[in-house]
Structures are given as C-alpha cells and as structure tokens.
Image (cartoon, rainbow, N blue to C red):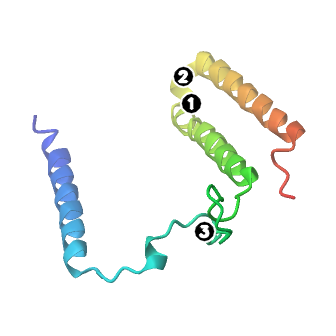
Amino acid sequence: MNAYVPILVIGAIALAFAVFSVGVASFIGPRRYNRAKLEAYECGIDPISHQSGEPGAAAGQRVSVKFYLTAMLFIIFDIEIVFLYPWAVHFDALGYFGLAAMALFIVNVSVAYAYEWRRGGLRWA
C-alpha cells in the first residue's frame, strides 16, 4: 500500500488543481456574452444564414467533406503510429514474435496508406 501513496497524493493534487481552476475561472471570468461568442464556429467559416426566407433554407455555408476526411485520416494514422512506441521500448524483450507482429502491423498500415493514396485521399487540391 505504501507504493501507491505517492500516486494517490499526485492524483489528489491534480484533482484539487482542476477543481480550483474551474471554480476560479467561473468567478473571475467574463460574463458578457454576445451573439458572436454564442454562435457555432466551424473551420473558419462564419455560420451566416442565407436570408432567403424559405423554410428549410440551409443556415451557413457548406463545408467540404474533404476537411473531415483529412482529419479522420490524420487521427487514424496518428493512432497507428502511437502503437509503435511501446514496441520500440520493449523491442528486446518481445523477441521474434514481437518482430513478426509488428511487421504484420506495418504491412497492414502500409496497405491502408497505399489504398488512400490510390483513392486520392492525400491530395490537397
């Protein structure tokens, strides 16, 4: 139990700091909200309505799906790269099984990368 005391102390300090920060921010933070601050913000495009008066008119401009696809590709490949760090740390202890598993993983990531490249998912234009 003595080994866990420092971890619990650090956790308690972190929790106290988080609660303190949120509490202080709610008391001393600005309370003057205006319409611009309360509107949704999406990738630099102001959400301005079309003023057409038609029921069902789309509010704001359309955002390209390419933005979301690029963000999802970044997240997927970023998470896959994060899996390489534990393998690199314990490379000696894993032996040939770890090497074979990571080789299979890298082949899998390479196939996904090649697929996205061929489909044009990495083109910025």
User: Does dot 2 land on a helix, a strand or a loop?
Assistant: helix
Question: Is residue 118 shown left or right of residue 121?
Answer: right
Give how far apart the Cα atoms at labels 1 and 2 are: 6 Å
Discs 1, 2 touching: Cβ within 8 Å: yes
Residue 91's disc is 1
Query: What number of labels is visible?
Result: 3
Query: In terms of image quadrants, where is residue 27?
Result: bottom left
User: Does dot 1 land on a helix, a strand or a loop?
Assistant: helix
Discs 3, 2 touching: Cβ within 8 Å: no
Give how far apart the Cα atoms at labels 3 and 2 are: 52 Å
Residue 83's disc is none
Given residues 4 and 83, the one toward you in this image is: 83
Give how far apart the Cα atoms at labels 3 and 1 are: 50 Å
Query: In terms of image quadrants, where is residue 82?
Result: top right
Given residues 16 and 26, the one toward you in this image is: 26
> Quick one: quadrant of the C terminus?
bottom right
**Residue under the image location 51 percent in, 25 percent down:** 93
**Residue under the image location 27 percent in, 79 percent down:** 29
Residue annotated with mark 3: 47
Q: Nearer the viewer, mark 3 or mark 1?
A: 3
Give the mark, 3 or 1, whose residue is nearer the N terminus: 3
Residue annotated with mark 2: 94
Given residues 81 and 23, the one toward you in this image is: 23
> Whole-percent x and y of residue 40?
51, 65
User: Does dot 3 land on a helix, a strand or a loop?
Assistant: loop
Q: Is residue 10 above or below residue 121?
A: below
Q: Residue furthest top?
A: 97
Q: Is residue 73 above or below residue 59?
A: above
